[in-house]
């Protein structure tokens, strides 16, 4: 029986409001709220709406996601596999809506349900998959490759707790778990049918195969399962939706009944807990041996699972017998030296498991040393410098040397960085392999860092030169024509004022800070480290304070110093720099003779979502890292 208008109005069910004017997106959202979230109008909360909205947006991606993967398989396209220990993705909702070009439509639907889109977006936790510029670079690469329609796959670890949530107590950093998965992650899809066995420890034994050839295999290993979780990565206004695959560690032995039945309940789950610790936390404290071992296990864990997955894809597309086409169909990008253990692991798989010979698979260090000595005339000292193994003193593997020897190309991420690599750090390698070390200057995605995070400035730019810049930053050169345009200058300044006002509101509501937007915002936000020289910046702050104290009627530019960033839990000096910043802030901000000219604030728990508010408001971005130590600095974002 058809319900009357009044009956529909009084109904507690969301889907009863659907009619012929409802969009497919609205129908999917309300059905998700009802059938997935199990909520009606009387029980729904804002977080339910956020999760349902994110799930519905993911649904909108799925058809293109599946189609993209099908087209890659059908065309037998060469695939790029991007391996990184970090992916600093930030929040996905706003960026995904921009890439799908449906932000306004979804905002109107949220308002129809009685919710503010900005508030719903703020409910999403930053994905706890990264910490610094390395992870942000990886995230921007994924966005760019999807926008360009490249057959690219990201691979990393699904860290259950991220790095940590930073608090400040009495000026000191305190670390608490970053439980970013507390309310689940609606963007990801668990693949319980897709898991690989990763083997640790054990010993190598030899045997004769059916052809009488000597082979080697690992036995008596401690095994951990790597289970896949997939996250869609949509391109900007394209049908391409690429994939980020994250591995979570699972025990091969969930529960030991022998221990449980004997009353030792802790021992019954020891294997499970020990195995799953591998993917628990990003960057375990490595100032102790256990932390170093766990970090190495993390690297091998995700590399081994990823290579098994890559080879499975290859075999599925090209057969199981030959690897002749492997180099022409597979490109593996290692983001920094962390995943470089992939090089010997790939060799092991190809030789021990796929039964390839050394000539096909590549015997690494011995053949390289022979080449350096016999064909390049390297003397003993230079051979020692380029060897994968450090033989003097404590023996260890030089991961950077291994990465260079085992890679087709090695790129610096800025002109200066590449110059230092070629002329100083790896000069011998540049002579051995001319043209192997190349420059690929870092870029950042304009979708997140301008169109999403600074809407007034984005709209101003589009009004003058169109929206082509969103996918091609070279288009921004067209703004040079307006450099002397007074009206344009005023509008640009107004966009900056609006950004500073937004940051002021955020800082007051979330952090309890009172920012003066009439001051210059002098900002240094990045990972806390000695080479990034936050200490130099705070010493400059003390100098400014002393100058004002000695000349209280001087002509000073009013300045607010803003710091933000996390120190590694075991990095004592960096943690003390945070304490110094907060102690200086306490003195400066409470000195009435100084605080009209100078303020200092430390923003705790710096993240991508916070950066989206801080960076557009910055008048001065402090980039003062020691030359040669900061590869590129992905925080150098002009707005």
Image: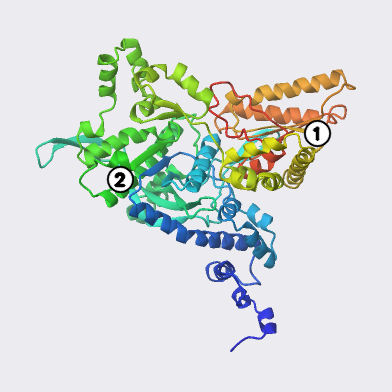
Q: Is mark 1 on a helix, strand or loop?
A: loop
- Choose top left, top right, bottom left or bottom right for residue 483: top right
- The answer, for residue 639, to whether it is visible in the render is no
Badge 1: how crowded within 10 Å, few (<14), some, or many (20+)?
Answer: some
Q: Quadrant of the C terminus?
A: top right
Q: Give the image location of residue 390, x and y in percent.
A: 36, 19
Q: Which colour scheme is used?
A: rainbow
Badge 2: how crowded within 10 Å, few (<14), some, or many (20+)?
Answer: some
- In the rendered image, which residue does mark 1 sit on? 519
**Residue at figure coordinates x 54%, y 40% from the top left:** 163
Furthest residue toward front: 481
> Marks 1 and 2, Cα distance to the nearest angstrom?
57 Å
Q: Give the image location of residue 328, x and y in percent.
A: 31, 40
Furthest residue toward right: 553
Q: Is residue 368 left or right of residue 605?
A: left
Q: Is mark 2 on a helix, strand or loop?
A: helix
- Choose top left, top right, bottom left or bottom right for residue 541: top right
Q: In which quarter of the image is the N terminus?
A: bottom right
Q: Is residue 161 left or right of residue 494?
A: left
**Residue at figure coordinates x 9%, y 37% from the top left:** 212
Q: Give the image location of residue 428, x and y in percent.
A: 38, 16
């Amino acid at each position: 029986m058809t319900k009357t208008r009044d009956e529909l109005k009084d109904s507690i069910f969301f889907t009863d409001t659907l009619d012929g004017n409802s969009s497919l997106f609205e129908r999917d959202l309300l059905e998700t709220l009802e059938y997935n979230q199990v909520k009606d109008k009387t029980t729904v909360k804002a977080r339910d709406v956020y999760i349902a909205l994110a799930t519905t947006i993911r649904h909108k991606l799925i058809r293109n996601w599946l189609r993209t993967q099908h087209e890659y398989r059908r065309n037998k396209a060469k695939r790029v596999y991007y391996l990184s220990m970090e992916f600093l993705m930030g929040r996905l909702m706003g960026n995904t809506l921009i890439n799908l070009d449906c932000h306004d439509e979804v905002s109107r639907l949220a308002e129809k349900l009685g919710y503010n889109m900005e508030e719903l977006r703020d409910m999403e936790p930053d994905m706890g998959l990264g910490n610094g510029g390395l992870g942000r670079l990886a995230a921007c690469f994924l966005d760019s490759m999807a926008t360009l329609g490249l057959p690219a796959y990201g691979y990393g670890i699904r860290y259950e707790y991220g790095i940590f949530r930073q608090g400040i107590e009495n000026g000191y950093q305190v670390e608490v778990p970053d439980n970013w998965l507390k309310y689940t992650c609606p963007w990801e899809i668990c693949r319980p049918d897709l898991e690989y066995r990763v083997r640790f420890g054990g010993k190598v034994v030899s045997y004769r195969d059916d052809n009488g050839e000597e082979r080697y295999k690992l036995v008596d290993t401690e095994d951990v399962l790597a289970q896949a979780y997939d996250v869609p990565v949509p391109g900007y206004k394209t049908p391409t939706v690429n994939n980020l695959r994250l591995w979570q560690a699972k025990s091969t032995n969930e529960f030991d009944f022998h221990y449980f039945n004997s009353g030792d309940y802790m021992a019954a789950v020891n294997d499970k807990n020990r195995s799953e610790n591998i993917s628990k936390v990003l960057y375990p404290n490595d100032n102790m041996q256990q932390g170093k071992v766990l970090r190495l296990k993390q690297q091998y864990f995700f590399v081994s699972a990823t290579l098994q997955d890559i080879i499975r894809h290859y075999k599925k597309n090209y057969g199981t017998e030959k690897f002749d086409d492997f180099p022409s169909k597979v490109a593996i990008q290692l983001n920094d030296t962390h995943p470089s253990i992939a090089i010997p692991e790939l060799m092991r798989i190809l030789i021990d498991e796929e039964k390839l010979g050394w000539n096909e698979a590549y015997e690494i260090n011995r053949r390289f040393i022979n080449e350096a000595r016999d064909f390049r005339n390297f003397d003993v000292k230079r051979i020692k410098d380029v060897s994968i193994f450090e033989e003097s003193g404590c023996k260890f593997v030089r991961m950077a040397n291994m990465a260079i020897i085992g890679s087709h190309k090695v790129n610096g991420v800025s002109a200066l960085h590449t110059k230092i690599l070629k002329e100083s750090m790896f000069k011998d390698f540049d002579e051995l392999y001319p043209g192997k070390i190349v420059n690929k200057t870092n870029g950042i995605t304009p979708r997140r860092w301008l169109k999403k995070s600074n809407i007034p400035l984005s709209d101003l730019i589009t009004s003058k030169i169109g929206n082509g810049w969103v996918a091609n930053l070279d288009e921004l050169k067209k703004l040079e024509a307006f450099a002397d345009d007074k009206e344009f200058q005023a509008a640009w300044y107004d966009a900056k004022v609006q950004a500073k006002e937004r940051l002021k509101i955020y800082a007051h509501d979330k952090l309890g800070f009172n920012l003066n937007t009439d001051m210059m915002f002098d900002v240094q936000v990045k990972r806390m480290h000695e080479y990034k020289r936050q200490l130099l910046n705070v010493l400059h702050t003390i100098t400014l304070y002393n100058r004002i104290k000695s000349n209280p009627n001087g002509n000073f530019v009013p300045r607010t110093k803003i710091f933000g960033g996390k120190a590694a839990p075991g990095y004592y000096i960096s943690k003390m720099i945070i304490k110094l910043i907060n102690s200086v802030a306490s003195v400066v901000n409470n000195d009435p003779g100084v605080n009209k000219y100078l303020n200092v604030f430390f923003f705790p728990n710096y993240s991508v979502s916070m950066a989206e508010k801080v960076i557009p408001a910055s008048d001065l971005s402090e980039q003062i890292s020691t030359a040669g130590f900061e590869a590129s600095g992905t925080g150098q974002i002009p707005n």
